[in-house]
Amino acid sequence: MNTLKVLRDLFYYNKEFATGLLLVLIVVAVAASSFFSPYPPLDVYVVPPDLPPSWQHPFGTTSRGQDVFWQLTFAIRNTLLFGIVVAVISRVISLCVGLVSGYRGGWVDRVLMSLNDTFVVIPLFPILVLFYFIMRDQMTWGLLALIVALLGWAYDARLIRSIAMSLRTREFTRQAVFSGMGTGRIVWQEHLPFVLPIVFSTTLNNINWSIGIEVTLSVLGFTDINTPTIGGMIYWANQHTALVSGIWWWVAFPIALVVLLFIGLFLLAISMNEYIDPRSRLSRLGGQA
Amino acid sequence: MTLLHPAAASAAAEDDAAIPLLSVDRLKAYYRLKLFGIDREVRAVDDVTFAIGRNEIYGLAGESSSGKSTLIKTIAGAIRPPLAVETGSVCFNFSDGTRDIYRLTPRELGEIRWKRLSYIMQGSMSVLNPVRRIRHSFTDFALPHVPEKGAAFAERIGRHLERLHLERSVLDAYPHELSGGMRQRVAIALATVCGPEFIIADEPTTALDVIVQKGVLAMLRGIQRELGSSVLFVTHDMAVHANLTDRLGIMYAGRLVEEGRTRDLFRQPLHPYTRHLISSLPQIGDDTPKKGLEGSPPNLAAPLSGCRFHPRCPLAIDICRREAPPMVAVAPGRRVACHVVTASPDAVAPAMEEVRP
Amino acid sequence: MKPNLLDVDNVSKTFAGRGLFSRRMKRAVRNVSFSLDADRPEVFTIIGESGSGKSTLASMILNTARPTGGSIRFEGRDLAHIRSRRDRVAFMSRVQAIFQNPFDAFNPLKPVDRYLYTAAEVFSGCRTKEARETRVDDALHKVGLSLAEVSGRFPHEMSGGQLQRIAIARALVSSPSLIVADEPVSMIDASLRMTVINLFRMLRDDLGVSIIYITHDLATAYYISDRLIIMQTGEVVEAGDARQVLAAPRHPYSIRLREAVLSVDGAWRGTGLDAEAIQPSLR
Ligand SMILES: Nc1ncnc2c1ncn2[C@@H]1O[C@H](COP(=O)(O)OP(=O)(O)OP(=O)(O)O)[C@@H](O)[C@H]1O
Ligand SMILES: Nc1ncnc2c1ncn2[C@@H]1O[C@H](COP(=O)(O)OP(=O)(O)O)[C@@H](O)[C@H]1O
Ligand code: SF4
Ligand SMILES: [Mg+2]
Ligand SMILES: [Mg+2]
């Protein structure tokens, strides 16, 4: 109820939020329409190939005889889902590591942070390509998501840790200790609410980041190209030298859609940042000024 | 009668009574919150009128969240949403002309800041940039406002620091390398280096221990005497007011409830809240039991009708619940807002006897 | 013979210097000793300027920091032997803490009563909701509040004095025999200050709780304490009966402290700021 009111106010008073929300909703609507697709996503030559955009095929058709629009609905759905799965897994890891490390300090902190630093310095791309060459056919969409998530939590864990460290010195943490709460309760009940807004905004950025990775990897062909994704579509377009033969719609629409998603998520993330700060100030209001 | 505070206040009251340095007239400043699902109006300053003469230290006392800092912010012209001035005016009568703070452009405001009007904040770390040496804070704030440049400027700052018993070497220190007391004195040095006519100090010594506090207060007083400036000094420590200020205003729930010469106020507090403040002060060598104020502090987001002190007031009568008492002058230089006191000052006298030390 | 409530025996704490190059050791507390009698509850005050080691000493007594020298015994048991969570809980139910800033003492995003309930559950083993509520209500009544006033309210809805009283009630839930209060009134204003101070007196007289009261406010120390120690740069420079020490301090540092206290009477007698307009002793 209160959250709804907050969202309403954000929508009315914050142009970035309104624009971002609109863009993301458009993309989600496209993804959702995949459930009504007349063609199964993996079938080829279901329509005449190489048709430019028309009433019948609004985004044209590919050289593989697929309708670009309906293909795109599957692609964006998978890509979006990929981003969300990666973000959720990596957020859970970074929350656990960051909160515990920041609160406990001492040797726990040292161990977790050296682990963290290892993950920060691992060169991302070579590792992913390496995995592809090792796994080859076993390299499914889900496995890739897991690997990217494992590589994507470290930076935020450090951010969360620094917040947890400052929360640890606050008096209410000591109050909690002397109320008999153990580490688990303090971390999950006392400290988590303070980092959630920030986690929420980094989640949006993390979705963007992982989608970027996925698109790049698939364009280069380092993923399971049989699951339709945005990157996969561009990969196939390149395989058929679509741009050279003037079939621009095969490349342009996927790129346009993913750019929309990028901008939308980015705007949401920055408007969330704006919101996080005054909100915490407001909640302190009425106490000491 | 020998005045222990050399008669700054009385002199000011006699000569310049007609043109006080600062006059605040029926000022109302509210925090308006209509954002993110919260609708609220906090009446932090509600109809405050007072004036400060030249060369005097005016104290402002009152409990936490009674609106002291808000009043100060509005006087300094530091009004940012959600804070908004509803009505009223704040007028400064500087040596080079009169200025209404709310009629100034941001540029004009910037020009009088530091030079004519300076501000020592609650917690000095916020003025001193933690990653820059003290020297840079001085060049940032003071350089634009003084005639000296280059070596002459450095000399002026050096001399000023020595006046405040700080070594010149603090200029090369970072804020965190100084002790709390030194930082507070650097903040005072910064606020006074341009020789301002009006200095605002918001709880500049609350976090300090007694020895350091005394030194800092003595210093503030010394520099005020030297510059002949006026100081608006805010704290809830009544002992500090007794020792430092010439005149004293007591705030309760966003309103001024009593005002007078500090001495008179301590000798003969009239408003029940003032009386409580003074009588509850523990002192070494005094073994009488002291009581805290019963009841809960006022909620400024939903102010009470009538006198805002009435739920906690031992003298409250019927009218107190209905009508807000106006601020009335009961003697020269003495004002109080209380129905009972203004109606029959005699009835209050016996109650006051027990208060006197 | 019954062991003392608390023995602080020649305790020191040294912090390793920060930074790569400054290997200086910081001796925050040096050879402090005192003890509290189990049969005579008292308000024991620790006075000192900021940085004199008061909080460090307090955290060692509360067993949140380990002394680097000497030992602390609570009811005859060395705190160094408290290791398991069970021992820590048992210790905390006997020795409780009250903190400095009531506005920061409760999580601003959570209702204040959860601390009270947790304490009732963990320390007093109240399993059912009813048992917890009775326990909490009892504790709140001791500080002049009731569960009805506190239940479900958030910190920003309460005043500083109420919050500090809730914090005291929270400490009382487990019926401790020692409460360590680190500058509990320095952040709250005069009118609330006496409410809290009077509560300490009540705890001592009516509930038999001993209190270690840490402050730099000599006037309130005079008002409630039985004995006190004065600390300077980690060392005890003067100790004894509170009224005697404050009325006639002997050590030069205590005398300076005593003289620095601003009082209302002093202002009229001229012992205030004018007597020594500029202090030579500023560091
Ligand atoms: N930025 C803000 N937004 C909304 N309300 C505010 C804000 N700042 C202060 N208030 C409210 O205005 C009232 C007066 O606050 P103010 O800071 O003036 O108190 P104060 O007298 O200086 O108290 P203290 O002694 O604790 O410094 C309080 O109820 C406070 O909660
Ligand atoms: N964790 C720490 N690391 C290094 N020095 C510390 C630490 N905690 C306190 N100190 C130092 O120990 C001294 C005593 O501090 P403290 O006990 O907080 O004093 P008080 O409570 O009397 O103001 C100070 O000089 C302080 O800087
Ligand atoms: S007006 Fe009435 S309630 Fe207010 S202070 Fe005076 S006597 Fe008390
Ligand atoms: Mg303030
Ligand atoms: Mg301390």
Image (tube, grey):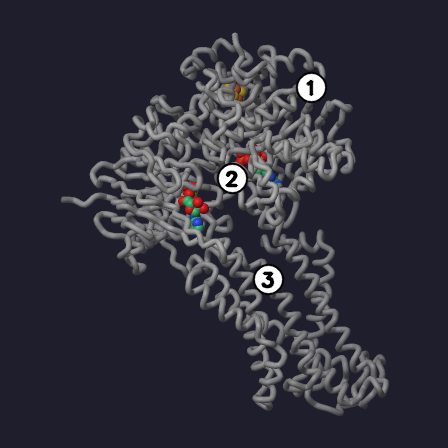
Find disc 3 in the rendering and name its residue.
Answer: A200
Say whether residue B73 is left or right of residue A183: right
| Residue at 77% across, 33% down | B104
**Foreground residue, C27 or B325?**
C27
**Secondary structure at numbered mark 3:** helix
Quick check: B17 above or below A23? above
Q: Which residue is mark 2?
A: B180
| Depicted B107 relative to depicted A262: above or below | above
Q: Position of residue A171 (x, y in %)?
A: 45, 48
Give the quadrant of residue C140. Answer: top left
Q: What's the CA distance linking mark 1 and mark 2? A: 34 Å
* Residue B74: image tag: none
Disc 1, ligand 1: is the CB inside 8 Å?
A: no
Quarter of the rendering containing residue B91:
top right
Are discs 1 and 3 both within one chain? no
Is residue C166 at all visible to an observer of this figure?
no
Label 1: state its secondary structure: loop
Which kind of residue does numbered mark 3 sit on? Phe
Chain letter for mark 2, please: B
Position of the N terminus of chain C, as image quadrant, is: top left
Q: Which residue is mark 1?
A: B20
Q: Secondary structure at mark 2?
A: helix
